[in-house]
Amino acid sequence: MGHSGKVRRHEMGIRMPAKRTTVRDLRRHNRSLLLSKLYFDGPLSRHELSGLTGLSAATVSNVTAELGEEHLITEAGLVESDGGRPRVLLRVDPAYGHVAGVDIGETGVKVELFDLTMNRLATVEHPLASPRPDAAAAVTQVASGLREVIAESGIDEATVLGVGVGVPGTVEQGAALRVHAPTIGWKEVPLTDLLRAEGVELPLFVDNGAKTQGQGEMWFGAGRGARHAVIVLIGSGVGAAVITDGTTYRGSTSSAGEWGHTTIVYGGQECRCGSRGCLESYVGAEGVLSRYRKARGGKPTTGEDEQTQFAALLESAGKAKAAAKVLEETAGYLGAGIGNLINLFNPERIVLGGWAGLALGEEYLPEIRRVAGEHALAHVFDQTEIELGQLGPDAVAIGAATLPVAALLDQGADPRTAGSKRGTAA
């Protein structure tokens, strides 16, 4: 998947408190600015870089010379100039290094390897035996998957800048990273420590899967160009990434976006989080299949796993009343939930993703939009686009792989040598 499209620097920037700027800070800022501009908008000439960034021609010349010596950028041909010599085009060098993206989901583990400009080189997927996978089992599959994609692509592990990991829960940063995912039974799981114990020595960047999907769609997919958006993930469970002014909104402890655990029915059906009436229990694949079984008097659904069962349910809608009714209700609950998002966040765009969200959206997007319009304030709804995600079921892994890239662009230097904080979403 070659990356394309224009993405603004602020869409992945991290805002820091104001402090006195040193020469070293300024140098890092200039490197970050030019590297990011080339990554998202390149190839560009030095003259274009100066005009787009506001940096002087001398600064651009000096910084690009440095970046070239470090092999972070490379020449990409010539472009004619007005009356002078042709100008050299520059771009980020795809061969500088590699990044891996991992999606730990309720149904399986996916590991993908990319070059620096996000061309996919290898992918492996391992199913998990239970929808509430043991953390140790998931970690074993991640470590195995990383070894497999590196071997399959024939690269040297030393060229991997980092591994991004998307998880189905909240990530607590601190002295030691902890993952909280109560819906699958994970409590204070020391994920990076477990991966290290399994032999993974590469730099690790961990974030919630809905947030990694959100960053992937903002950089390369249906979120491109929007400054205010909500990227929704519907799989077995439900989450969202809220993008405000180009930056992912995290809240005080990084758990913002737990949209699946907002209440859609007071006193409603039990959710696997322990509460009742959560949106997830009505539109997440596990909840939808549970409602379908109940509608059929407890008869089991066909299919060996959740994804095949969900696909069979969608296929049955044209010929089975129970299936059609459950899916129409699901589209209604989802539309109402999206209406809530529109009223709360006033986004320009809502992107529907996740394997179950994409499958539902393919069939029911007009109905979802209609119901969202009934539940959102009219003047706000009229200014909101509702679209399907463009990165498909790989979105969480692609977004996870952007985490080490974001660290590289933010620091203007290799995250392995720039002293980046391990185990954080960069």
Image: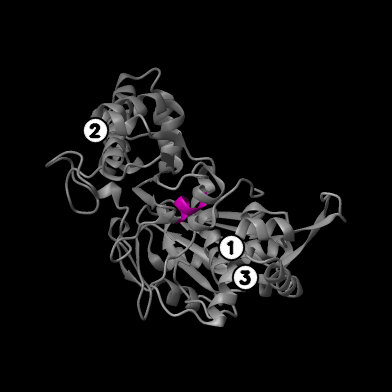
The residue at which mark 1 appears reads as 100
Which of the two discs, 1 and 3, labels the residue nearer the N terminus? 3
> Is residue 215 a member of the stretch shown in magenta?
yes
Q: CA distance from mark 1 to mark 3?
A: 24 Å
Q: Secondary structure at mark 3?
A: helix
**What residue is rendered at 60% in x and 70% in y?**
30
Query: In this rendering, would 194 be left or right of 53?
Result: left
> Is residue 412 a member of the stretch shown in magenta?
no
Query: In this rendering, would 90 be left or right of 350?
Result: right
Q: Position of residue 357 (x, y in %)?
A: 41, 38
Q: Secondary structure at mark 1?
A: strand
Q: Secondary structure at mark 2?
A: helix
Query: In this rendering, would 2 be left or right of 208?
Result: right
Residue 117 seen in this snapshot = no
| Above or below, 255 relative to 24 | above
Q: Nearer the viewer, mark 1 or mark 2?
A: 1
User: Along the line of sight, which residue is nearer the eye, 135 or 179?
Assistant: 179
The residue at which mark 3 appears reads as 31
The residue at which mark 2 appears reads as 294
| Above or below, 329 relative to 78 | above
Tally of marks: 3
The answer to which image quadrant residue 360 occupies is: top left
Q: Position of residue 384 (x, y in %)?
A: 38, 34
Q: Mark 1 belongs to which amino acid?
A: Ala
Q: Mark 3 belongs to which amino acid?
A: Arg
Image: magenta residue range: 212-216
Prevailing secondary structure class for the magenta stretch in the rendered image: helix
| Above or below, 365 relative to 279 | above
How would you rate the neighbour count of disc 2 (Cα within 10 Å): few for under 14, some for 14-19, many for 20 or more?
Answer: few
Which of the two discs, 3 and 2, labels the residue nearer the N terminus? 3
Residue 53 seen in this snapshot = yes
